[in-house]
Image (cartoon, rainbow, N blue to C red):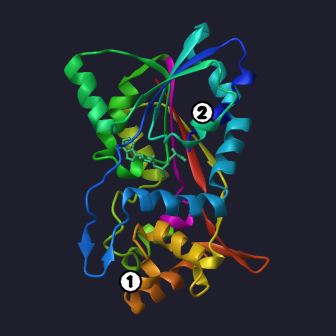
Amino acid sequence: MDTIPELKRNRFPSMNFEAEILTAPHDNSEPYMISAMRSLTAEEYVEAFKSFLDHSTEHQCMDEFNKEEMPSIMASLGNGKQTINILGVGSGTELVNQASDLQNVSFVWHQLTSSEYEQQVKEKGTDKKFDFIHMIQMLYRVEDVLSTIKFFHSCLDHHGKLLIIILSDSSGWASLWKKYRHCLPPTDSGHYITSNSITDVLKRLGVEYHVYEFPSGWDITECFIEGDPVGGHMMDFLTGTKNFLGTAPPGLRQRLQEALCQPECSSKKDGRIIFSNNLSMIVVES
Ligand SMILES: C[S@@+](CC[C@H](N)C(=O)[O-])C[C@H]1O[C@@H](n2cnc3c(N)ncnc32)[C@H](O)[C@@H]1O
């Protein structure tokens, strides 16, 4: 799930990297019940997320960004330092464990949330600075978006950069969260934030940034096929709800399925329904 492999280290043969990764600990608590509908447990979330990744161009879109924009972004990091210190926040562990091209990267894993890390840094008075910090598709679940960005920005070294990847305001998610919020169940927790909310925060903090927009799509056709297990998992990811299609009141289910087909959410291509998953890559200067 991590993006570090996609930074394609071979393109920077003269640099070494030290990466630190923050990832939220697993939550083994009992799921919260709201009548028959309930939120996803951590394990169920991972399963639903995989269905989303399998049917969307989420990571391919990030790969495009890595190929097209990252080389010049990386080139200006660290001002000639030999070792580039990287902090990945909310990266997960899956792909890094399997990657074979990461010999010149030393990893330190922190199984703790961004706010726990912030507390730890403040308590210990450590002042470790990073040349590159990335927060990829994870700000939806932090406690306080502004203070989280402010804190991690303060962890940047001179000539450092913070990369935030977040859903674009041109995505179907943005329309769903703004215009069709009433179609979403209360089991769907977290912040409904998209790129503009982040750039508003960055303006308030008075920091310099650049936004790159990259198109991405999610084929949700199976979500409309009665009894389709993949469609079921994808609806669970979309709604943050376990077995949404089986437990949602029929009216809510119908409203959501109708909203998903609206042109501000999706388009039809070769008979398939493609939900817009456009991403904004926001590069913040130190
Ligand atoms: C949608 S996944 C994205 C994973 C990966 N960055 C990617 O793009 O494939 C969100 C990740 O953020 C992590 N996460 C959520 N809230 C977090 C927090 N407050 N601190 C650290 N990690 C968090 C989750 O554990 C999960 O791995």
Q: Which mark is residue 191?
A: none
Mark count: 2
> Could you tell which of marks 2 and 1 lies nearer the N-terminus?
2
Q: Dot 2: few (<14), some (14–19), or many (≥20) neighbours within 10 Å? A: some
Q: Amino acid at mark 2?
A: Ile
Does the magenta-highlighted stretch encompass residue 161? yes
Along the horizontal axis of the image, is 115 left or right of 85? left
The picture places residue 260, in percent across and down from the top left corner, at 55, 77
- Which residue in the rendered view is the most extreme toward the right? 270
- In the picture, the quarter occupied by the N terminus is top right
Q: Which residues are magenta?
A: 159-174
Q: Which residue is mark 1?
A: 247
**Quick one: 146 or 42, which is closer to the camera?**
42
Q: Which residue is mark 2?
A: 4
Does the magenta-highlighted stretch encompass residue 88? no
Q: Dot 1: few (<14), some (14–19), or many (≥20) neighbours within 10 Å? A: some
Local SS, label 2: helix
* Contact between labelled residues 1 and 2, with CB atoms less than 8 Å apart: no
Query: Residue at position x 70%, y 29% from top?
Result: 8
Along the horizontal axis of the image, is 175 left or right of 55? left
Query: Residue at position x 51%, y 65% from top?
Result: 173
The picture places residue 179, in percent across and down from the top left corner, at 44, 74
